Image (spheres, helix red, strand yellow):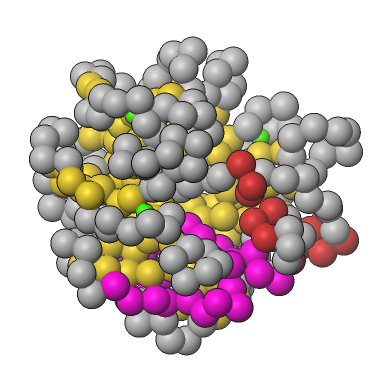
Amino acid sequence: MTKARTVLVTAGMIVTSTLTAAFCGGVAAVPAYAASSGSILFTSNQGGHKDIWIMHPDGTGKHRLTDDETADDFAAASPDGRRVVWTRGVFFGPESEIWVMNIDGSGKRQLTFNDASDGGVATWSPDGTKIAFKSSRDSANPDRPNNEIYIMNADGTDQHNITNHPAEEVLPDWSPDGKKIAFVSDRGGDFAIYTMATDGRNVRKLTEDSMYAANPRWSPDGKRILFADGSCHRPCKYDHNDLWVRNDDGKSPKQLTNSAVNELPGDWSRDMKYAVVNYYFSSRTEGQPISDLAIVDLTRGTVSKLTNTEEIREENPFWLH
Ligand SMILES: [Ca+2]
Ligand SMILES: [Ca+2]
Ligand SMILES: [Ca+2]
Ligand SMILES: [Ca+2]
């Protein structure tokens, strides 16, 4: 089963972190996994601006699907693997739009048209007929965006708000059975992961206030949710996230990584043995943290770098099964 998801990285997440001895000793330079297949969609600035790229899970066969001076980011493939939804625009700025294209980069088409922030995250329903995303279009005050989770048909029609809540609602991920959407909200104070029915009802909180949770990703079998937690590094919060997994009813939490590196899901491999994650860590020089992709062995918690380029930023991977 293919599961659609995307990754949000907020400005607050990209903060300089510090390399630790644990990182230096615990990360393999060459991916150690072998059993996973498919392709990985991701964002790279290799061509001078952020574009959507695709590669094999071993890092070979890399090529670009977009080539535009406007930032392209947060790609997610449709369940049949034939279409890609992504966000074009300055995501941290006031305006961005949702686009779709074919998996070969042809047939690009814009689906949202307004001066608010749409996307940053978009996720396909398992039957491929709908797309969930977040939008700030209903904000009463443009200086204080109020993001909501929206659903639209995959052709862009019938765009409607399913959360209608004064708090922030972001990072939607559609469950593999099609019945629920996981999302992140600060409606309870700190950011936590919630699930809801696709009509916005039956909201359920999955993570405790003691966590600072983000980036929920359903497992392909729909039984577990991979997510990031930044609580152990308060008040830095998102800049040193660790990976956790727990059942979709919130039970059986398990911490997978414990490092000063900022690890953010990412997506599951189809066999659910691995996850591809964002991997942010500081360089020895000043400036933005280095941004690479890594593969996490979900049984052992070991991390293998998938890209290893200090000068190129790779982010926001989606595993196309
Ligand atoms: Ca917009
Ligand atoms: Ca809201
Ligand atoms: Ca970490
Ligand atoms: Ca890099």
Residue at left 39%, top 76%? Answer: 205
Tell me, yes or no, whether the highlighted magenta stretch contains residue 258: no
Question: Which quadrant of the figure has residue 314?
Answer: top right
Relative depth, front residue between 128 and 91: 91
- Residue 212 is left or right of residue 80, and the answer is right
Residue displayed at 53% across by 69% down: 189
Q: Can residue 271 be seen in this view?
A: no
Magenta residues (range):
203-232
Query: Does 320 appear above or below 260?
Result: above
* Quadrant of the rendering where the N terminus is positioned: bottom left
- Is 207 a magenta residue? yes
Q: Nearer the viewer, residue 274 or 71?
A: 71
Residue 170 coordinates in the image, percent (x, y) = 41, 52
Q: In this view, does 105 lie to the left or right of 96?
A: left
The relative height of residue 37 versus residue 228 in the rendered view (above or below) is above
Residue 142: image location, x then y, percent: 44, 35
Q: Is residue 235 visible?
A: yes
